[in-house]
Amino acid sequence: MLRNFLTVGGWTMLSRILGLIRDQLLAAFMGAGPLQDAYQVAFRLPNMFRRLFGEGAFNAAFVPMFSTVMVQDGRDEARLFARRTLGVMLAWLIFLCVLGEVFMPQVLRVIAPGFLQSGDRYALAVSLSRITFPYLVMICAAALFAGVLNGLHRFGMASAAYLAFNVVGIIAIIGASPFFPSVAYAAAWGVTVSGVVQLGLLAWACEKAQFGLMPLWPMLTPRIRLLLRRMVPGLIGSGVGQINLTVDTIIGTLLPAGSVSLMYFADRINQLPLGVLGAAAGTTLLPVLTRHLSAGDIEGAHAAQSRSMEYVVLLTLPAVAGLLVLAGPIMIVLFGHGSFTEHDALLSAQSLRAYAIGLPAFILVKVLSPAFFARGDTRTPVYVGIGVLLLNFVLNLLFMKPLAHMGPPLASSVTACVNVVFLAVLLQRKNALRLSGATLFHMGRVSIGALLMGLGLWGIEHVVELPTLFVTRALWLAGMVCGGGALYAVLLHGLGVADLAAMAARIQRRLLRKAQ
């Protein structure tokens, strides 16, 4: 399980690094203003449906069913189920895409009401959204292919294919911009083209695995009906999360111009650990839990759940400490160039700190939710999500004026923490989550190590200030990150969480085996 966790995490990390380069280009060319705001809203719309229909409810319902059919009825029956599902999915997505293209002006009046104050920004957002919206068809279909590959325990290619989004995006921004009215148009077309590339790569990977998936004519067979019934609560649950993001977007468009951009770039940095660890934990844990539960191995399911939570805490808490201390230098070094000024970077750093507070909770939600999904319970997270939705809306209204661009991120962090608490309590009541004293003690020591590391970084930052030149700034930041990581490792060794000598020996043995 750890190997799969690291495989998915490694590919996701590479994707995040390329995504960071893409975002740096967007910041440098468009800055934080009306043009950037319009593009970000245009991209968020298909991305919202991707998370809703592609990665959220669909994966939660499809992956356990696919894995069960594979174990109980064999490979051919599982392939037939996947092909029928693909046919139904494509029919629905194409219909949804056509509706979106026709009614895009009305849709943006709802999700970006602040743009109506500026006719140019509203018109630009409509044009860009019509370019990016077909992305949802390709990327949701790609999610099915990825789910099949995960069910076949081919986690590498399923994760690697998503690199195409950032690779194509970078090429579009750099190479295609001169041929369009603005960089925003080139970036928008890059989004849609990347969806075609990702779908093609995943389809090829399934063919290579001798599991080709040509769609069948849509038919509501009993198994497809069961899938849809299981998806409905998940759609509501995922919809709650997406409504939360939509509320953040609505609030952002009502704030001063550039607020949507400031929050976006802060969220992108927050997504580095969130995307890597969250995707790795959620993607690898659901099939593992399903397999244990299908085999009647309850203790194995509990052990897998506890290990995932330990991994998340171990890797997330130092990221939180680092982001809270180094948010300003991080945003200045990574984005403070071109049209994105140093002042913009410092404002965005305020949003980043607000996001970072909830980082462990954001990831733990992805670890706890599969415990419900693997048991066929997609309703409980929905009920919790509805409460979280209401809380997020209230907090956004409360934070909007006094906190401006920090309000929506802080509201999201607080609601994520509340979400985790309720999910954990409900799982324990269902006897689906067992955290031993040893596990809690381990997490406590990790927390102490992360806190001490953060205090160490804070002290060093006040002694050695950020230089003025870009090269020396980059070296300073790299040194702080590496130094913080080394300090964290030493602290974990001192607290008895990790044995550095044993880890070094294990790495050395693995390198020797590969060399042979």
Image: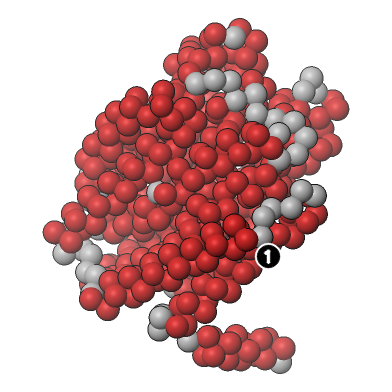
Whether residue 330 is visible: yes
- Residue 36 at x, y = what percent? 65, 27
324 shown above or below 254: below
In the displayed structure, does residue 306 sit left or right of residue 338? left
Total numbered badges shown on the rendered structure: 1
In the displayed structure, does residue 226 sit left or right of residue 402? left
Residue underneath mark 1:
479
Q: Quick one: quadrant of the N terminus?
A: bottom left
User: Element under label 1?
Assistant: helix
458 shown above or below 231: below
Q: Residue at x 46, y 34 (%)?
A: 406
- Residue 442 at x, y = what percent? 34, 75
- Residue 142 at x, y = what percent? 55, 46
Dot 1, crowdedness within 10 Å: few (<14), some or many (≥20)?
few
Q: Residue at x 27, y 34 (%)?
A: 391
Q: Nearer the viewer, residue 446 or 483?
A: 483
- Residue 345 at x, y = what percent? 64, 38
Q: Nearer the viewer, residue 2 or 444?
A: 444
- Name the amino acid, label 1: Gly
Q: Residue at x 29, y 47 (%)?
A: 419
Q: Residue at x 57, y 49 (%)?
A: 327
Q: Quick one: quadrant of the C terminus?
A: bottom right
Whether residue 11 is visible: no
The picture quadrant where one finds residue 450 is bottom left
373 shown above or below 102: below
